[in-house]
Amino acid sequence: GPLRVLVFGGALRAGSVNARLASLVARLVSDHGATADLATMREFAMPPYDGDAEAAEGVPQGALALRDRLELADAFVISSPEYNASVPGVLKNAIDWVSRIRPQPFGTKNALLVSASPSMIGGNRALWSLRVPLEHLGTRVYPDMFSLPRAYEAFAEDGQLTDSGLQQRLTQTVVAFLRFVEADARYVCLRRR
Ligand code: FNR
């Protein structure tokens, strides 16, 4: 069947520009022959990691929910905000909890990282930080990344980017990622034969 791609924003708030960018990426994924599963961080809400809570109650519901959605997907896309030049704590906390589950859910996936920020840089530094825990867990993080600058003014009514150059660059990045994941899925099939 078609590739399944989980797409989610890394922020909890309803008006998140990263949730808007995640929606746009999900639309591009469906427009190019794959199935998009759009999620928000709210669905994966969980307490801060606490080893005592883990020992007493195990991994929380929100982390198990994220694991379930990852399991259904061939690949995932995260749209992450940038907090103090790094990954927001909420997203890092989710990665930390999910990393405690066996089999470890991030280890076998391909991922594309995108970000949106009101700044001129577009949150790019958060993505370099986000690579570190994901690559540590074995996720194959796609080399190309997309950062949307001036994100509060970047979206048109229809959810597309008003800047046609940026819209084109985002589309090309998503399409190249989908082609890479398809090729990788074929390679994995060959290897398993
Ligand atoms: C920010 N913001 C921010 N932006 C940025 O480009 N670089 C940064 O280092 C920071 N640092 C930062 C720290 C904290 C604690 C907050 C709350 C915010 C601004 C941030 O990009 C902005 O709030 C975005 O709107 C967050 O993304 P969402 O929630 O709109 O998806």
Image (cartoon, rainbow, N blue to C red):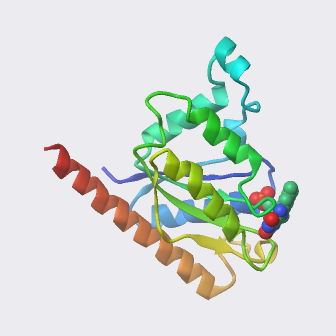
Q: Is residue 16 visible?
A: no
- Along the horizontal axis of the image, is 144 left or right of 17? left
Q: Position of residue 65 (x, y in %)?
A: 59, 32
- Along the horizontal axis of the image, is 66 left or right of 1? right
Q: How many marks?
A: 0
Q: Position of residue 99 (x, y in %)?
A: 55, 35
Query: Could you tell me which residue is drawn at 40 percent across and 44 percent down?
Result: 108
Quadrant where the image shows the C terminus: top left
Q: Nearer the viewer, residue 116 or 58?
A: 58
Seen in the picture, residue 193 relative to 98 is either above or below; the reply is below
Q: Position of residue 78 (x, y in %)?
A: 59, 55
Q: Nearer the viewer, residue 32 or 72?
A: 72
Q: Residue furthest top?
A: 56
Q: Position of residue 12 (x, y in %)?
A: 77, 47
Question: In which of the image's four quarters is ligand 1 placed?
Answer: bottom right
- Along the horizontal axis of the image, is 97 left or right of 101? right
Query: Could you tell me which residue is drawn at 48 percent across and 69 percent down?
Result: 174
Query: Could you tell me which residue is drawn at 58 percent across and 29 percent down?
Result: 64
- Along the horizontal axis of the image, is 165 left or right of 70? right
Seen in the picture, residue 3 relative to 178 is either above or below; the reply is above
Quadrant in which residue 150 is drawn: bottom right
Q: Residue furthest left?
A: 193
Q: Is residue 167 visible?
A: yes
Query: Could you tell me which residue is drawn at 73 percent across and 77 percent down?
Result: 121
